[in-house]
Structures are given as C-alpha cells and as structure tokens.
Amino acid sequence: MTAIIISVVLMLVSVALDQVSKYLVVANMELYESVDIIPGVLRMTYIHNDGAAFGSMDEHRWIFMILSTVAIIGILVYMFWKKPQDKLLLSALILITGGGIGNMIDRIALGYVIDFIDFCAFPSVWMWIFNIADSCVCIGAGLLALWLILDMIRETKAEKAKKLAAVSAEITKSESEASEKTEDAEDIESETDSENAENTEQKTEDENCDDGDGNE
C-alpha cells in the first residue's frame, strides 16, 4: 500500500509540474513567441497542439483522446489491482500516467495541448515542440521497454537455471542408480565368493574324510 501511495503522490507531482509550467508559459508569453534558453540549442516556443504528442494525429483528436483515456484507466487499474513492487516498472507507469493526465487536462479544458519546449539544435532532424507531459510519457515508455527487456532476460535465465537443475537432478539420479547397481553387483559377487569358499571348504573336508576312510 505504501508503494501505491508514493506512486500516486509522484504522479500528482508530475501532473502539477506540467500544469504549472504551462500556466507560466501562457501568463508570460504570446502565442508563437520564442525565447532562447540556450541559443541555437534550446528555446521556448509557445504553440497550441491539436493532436497527440509532438503534434501527431491532429486530424483524429477524439480518437486519440479515447485511446489515451482507456490507457490511463488501464494503467491505474493495473497499479491498484496488481500492486507492482518493481521500482523500474512503477517509475515507468507513474511517468506515463502522469504525462497522459497532464495532456488530457489540456484537451478537456482547452481543446488543445500547450507545447513550449523547442529543441532546435538539429532542425532538419527534429522539428517538434513538446512539453513536460510529453517528456514524461516518452521517458516512461523508454523505462517500460527497458523493464520488459530485463524481465525477458530474467525469465530466460530462470528457465535456463530450471533446465540446468532438472539435468543436474537427472544426472544425480542416474549416478545414484548406477551406484546402487554397483553395490548390488558387489554384494552378489561377495555372496558368490562366500558360497564358493564354503563349497571349496566343504569339498576339502569331504576329501579329507574320504582319505581318512581309505587309510583305514
């Protein structure tokens, strides 16, 4: 329960950071105004985004809103129902959900999303303007992908260890059976030697008796 409470608090913090940053941009900048933060690398450019993250799906806004709502509800249900304890997985879900809620608030309240982070170092490669919520979603998605890869590696290692343990147990069983067979063979050989020795001794005694009778 403690992990869930912390997760909710962090989620709300990410939403608050997103909304406060957007409020400050709207209060201090004009639409389409740009302010250099690091000249030639990073600037703040205030725009309205009618689509999804980075301006995609602007002609299918309602479809994206429905998908986003379903995804957010699904993640929240998973977090409260399954109560995952893995920190990497929790971090990913917190960021994705917090970012999704931040942008959903804009879409419901304004009909568009406020974007302002303009990474302009490579304009021919990167031309999208985004916000803190977009960053949270992308970082969360990256962490989720990393968790899935690590989880697959853990499962593969566990499966290999299980197979190795099964093989080792089979080898131990075979060695034990072989040892038992060897012991049984040794016991039989020992019994045979003992019987042969008794027969030889008995035969010698019989011969001695026959020799004694002959001498008489």
Image (tube, rainbow, N blue to C red):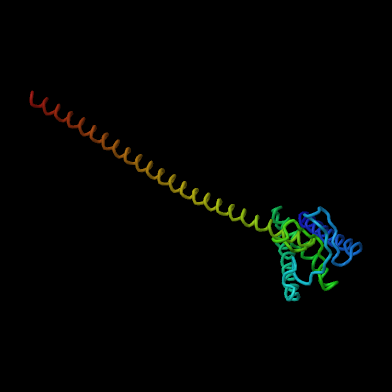
Q: Which residue occupies 84% across, 64% down?
A: 46
**x and y percentages locating residue 165 in the rendered image:** 50, 48
60 or 39, which is in the foreground?
39
89 or 52, which is in the foreground?
52
**x and y percentages locating residue 45 in the rendered image:** 83, 62
Identify whether 49 is placed above or below 155: below
Identify whether 101 is placed above or below 202: below
Q: In this view, does 50 lie to the left or right of 159?
A: right
**x and y percentages locating residue 20 in the rendered image:** 87, 60
Q: Which residue occupies 37% across, 43% down?
A: 178
Image quarter of residue 148: bottom right
Q: Quadrant of the C terminus?
A: top left
Q: In which quarter of the image is the N terminus?
A: bottom right
Q: Which residue occupies 40% across, 46% down?
A: 174
Q: Which residue lies furthest to the right in this view?
A: 27
Q: Is residue 196 left or right of residue 15?
A: left
Image quarter of residue 205: top left
**x and y percentages locating residue 121 in the rendered image:** 74, 56
Identify whether 37 is placed above or below 61: above
Identify whether 170 is placed above or below 126: above
